[in-house]
Amino acid sequence: MTIDLLIPLLAATVQAGTPVLYATLGEMVTERSGTLNLGVEGMMLVGAFAAFLASTATGSPWVGFVAGGLGGLGLAAVHGLVTIVFTGNQVVSGLALTILGSGLAAYLGTPYVGANTPGFGHLPLPLLADIPVLGPVFFRHDALVYVSYVLPVLIWLLFARTRLGLALDAAGENPAAAKAAGLSVPGLRWLGVLAGGFLVGLGGAYLSLSYTHLWTNGLAAGRGWIAVALVIFAFWRPGRAVLGAYLFGGVMAFQLRLQASGTVLPSSLLLMLPYVLTILVLLLSSIRGRVKNAPAALGANVEPEG
Amino acid sequence: MRRLLSFAACLLLVLATGLAYAADKEVKAGFVYVSPVGDAGYSYAHDQGRKMLEKDMGVATTFVEAVPEGPDSERVLTNMARKGYNLIFATSFGYMDPVIKVAKDFPDVVFMHCSGYKQAPNVGTYFGRIYQARYLTGLVAGSMTKSAKIGYVAAFPIPEVIRGINAFTLGVQAVNPKAEVRVVWTKTWYDPALEKDAAKSLLDVGCDVIAQHQDSPGPQEAAQERGVYSVGYNSDMSKFAPKAQLTSAVWNWGVVYKYVAEQVKKGTWKSEDIWWGMDKGVVDIAPFGPMVPKDVQDKVNAKKAELVKGQDNIFAGPIADQKGAAKAAAGQKLSDKELLGMNWFVKGVIGTTE
Amino acid sequence: MRLSIVKRQEPLPGGSFFILAGALVFSLSISALLLALQGKSALGGLYVLWHGAFGAGYALVDTILKSVPIYLCGLGVAVAFRMQIWNIGAEGQFAMGAVGATWAALTFPEAPAALVLPLMFACAALAGGAFAFIPAWLKTRLKVNEIISTLMLNYIAILFLDYLVYGPWKEKRSFGFPMTAQFSDAAVIGGIGGSRLHWGLVVCVLAGILVFVMLRFTRLGFELKASGSAARASRYARMPYDALVWTVMAICGALAGTAGLIETSATVNRLQPSVMAGYGYTAIVVAWLARLNPLTIALAAFFLAGLRVGVENLQLELQVPAAFGNIMEGLILLSVLAGQFFQTYRIALRRRAG
């Protein structure tokens, strides 16, 4: 493959990886504070719709972007209500959330199918965009891609350098100790669920404001599930989330380009590539002894206080 | 006296219409769709046909959308028949076995299955020769390409899709013998983001016109963003990509639906295989975009006029497959049966049917 | 005075019934309200829903048939969840079971039912079970998290099924459509006494009893529970943890694989991509909602199947979009889940001391 094909491939990798990256980071924040939310797919869909609606109504893509986050947050709040307040099972609640979210987005969104969104256009960054290779790959996208470059760093800082991050981790690792230390575990978990839902919603907003500029149903098309898998792939670390999202986006973009350049391999087998590769990379990390476990109290609810 | 006569005439007229109505069967038509109708794609096109049936003939209709092609469809079909719908359109290929099964239990209900090949005394089949429209869009695409590379984003390697790609390619090569058509399979009917990226992958290898057999307008959008041309499918997709769309291959199912409903109403319906084309107006192309030059439009319209007259020579020989082996010699024409089971690409297509 | 939450000394007697009823009243009221907002009759809508799911003999049969695969998969994942193995791979194991059974049916088209059906069951259980060994191996030997490995393997299994029906197993006479040849009559699981209820139902009952007995009365069941509720307790168990992981994965894979076989053989009669309807994921909801109890899983599966069948009727009679059914299902699940809270806790009015 020549360099003129490689650069568009890598640029497409970044684009395809971005929505998954937002969602992966969101789910990561939620899970590190101890709540498993399998409703990522549903939250992305609602986020995508909210983003579309708000940006069309106001004409401002940024308002849409925030609205997408709020849409995800709203659905995540239902999960918080069911699991944190009513101590309902996190797995069922998350799956039910996906069903509810996809229903809501399709039901509310159908009348608008085909409507154009004032989304984000390409915004090559001055100077950076002119760097050979790196410029076209990383710095000739839209604003939301650039936001996604900053986000992992911020989340890393949050968990590695701030007290709040430590507290969130404590709620996920050892709620009893966190409580003994005077922290409000339910409060921290609410924060994790809502902040995570917001980020996932932003991923949905990327789909309806950047990836495509028109509203159609079913925009997430399974990307939420990939995000759930990538959180584990990333061992709950923001840096590896970037790797995972780009790896996944990259392999998907690669197999399409392999077909476009006229390969004769059956497409079913090519489409398996991203999934097989995800397992293989995990295997490799495992052989090199780099496995890190899930937050110890992930999925376990905290009993309400009397 | 005159008044009496006119009164009698009126009476006769009323009686006659009354009798005519009595001879007619009341038609209640049910439709089963594989995807939600709101998505501007395949089911949407069928639903437009249903609405036309309702509006033009006053037939009562209902539909169930997003019905998976497995056992769920059997139940939905049964319930429709049970609820008194006496004409049922099953609009997707995967409903074939369930339709045949259910039809046995309801001999008085007329079932029409779209795109299948199994019939029964109360099961007819129907489809449209959308490949005719594809051929015409191929003529347009072949005239407009500068790089002589055209991209085709396709859903699943089934005969219907392959036939469309072949007809399109034959159209392209009729005006531009050196041009090639590159195919990317997405294995989705509807994933706007993935399908858009598939189109981009084709643009990256130098394609400058994008055609599609997908339900989402994703590929159209990709073409518009890169400033190249596109060809749509299902319905006029120009609202998604006004600057890019040259034309679209479009369905007009209402024609079939009205015909069948009329037959059922009169009681003259017989099981048959309807495979109509442009001559009956089931398929068509959308109005040309402003970028299509007059001479191209004229050429395409001339060819269209032939098809409208029923002269379909699209798959007339000589036709060779990808490896150059002859599939139809000069003077031969591929039969409908060969078209229905098409699982090979014509020469000029780059890609695999697996 | 303030509200406080008090843990019940004992679970509310007969509580699950009242809670279920309460949650249903709550979520159905919201759904009715949403219906009314669309200008549809709220009570009429609920009646149509009920009637479509449970209100007639045929509706009950439909609901029971739909709950068969959900139940088998639910039973399987429940066994794994009991020892806190987060196996979400029932979907992929279902696919592999269908593939295994299809291999047997296609390889021995002439064999009598007495031979081919047992062979199909064996192949389905083996294929599903063996496929489940991959995540078991990855987990025990290489510490790869089973949620991710099972999820990825689901995609891989479905694509593998696709590959087979689009490629080597495609029937020659199917006009290139992706499906295998129809199974011989011997390879089709028939109806019980000529009814639509097939023998797969009996398999469900047997599987349910077996799993119940295993969990309740055998040492294996005890050890599963012990290693699930506290990793430390399992150290005292006779069976090593790794062997238990392999065992539960094998059981789950075999049950999900059997579900794949029953769907393929009894309802579709051949292998085609549409056999995958997401039952493996539905099963997870069902298993947890039923708190991993083999008996209540049957009820939950029946209920959820009824809801999905009933929603089709809602579409048919009132033209309510399919997405509305998802909203209802989500609401009902979430409120039943939240309602379970009151089984173990109650809200008390407490006078502030001092």
Image (cartoon, rainbow, N blue to C red):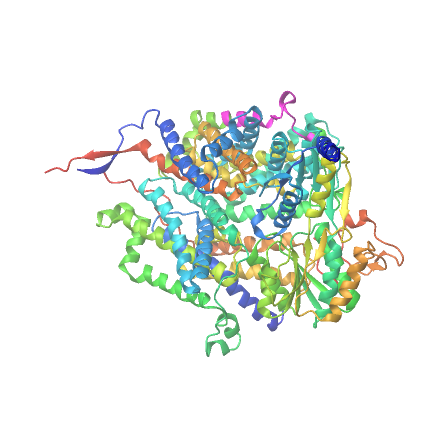
Q: Nearer the viewer, residue B98 or C55?
A: C55
Quadrant location, the N terminus of chain C? top left
Q: Is residue C306 left or right of residue A296?
A: right
Vertical order, C189 against A151 (above or below)? above
Q: Is residue C133 visible?
A: yes
Residue C190 drawn at (x, y percent): 65, 26
Query: Residue A132 colored magenta?
Result: no
Magenta portion: prevailing SS class: helix
Query: Residue C197 colored magenta?
Result: yes
The residue furthest top is: C193
Over which residues does the magenta segment extend?
C187-209
Q: Nearer the viewer, residue B209 or B42?
A: B42
Residue A63 drawn at (x, y percent): 40, 62
Q: Is residue B337 left or right of residue B145?
A: right
Residue A288 drawn at (x, y percent): 46, 57
Q: Is residue B14 left or right of residue C219?
A: right
Question: Could you tell me how many numbered marks the image carries?
Answer: 0
Q: Is residue B149 left or right of residue C332?
A: right
Which residue does the image show at 73% across and 70% down from the upper left? B294
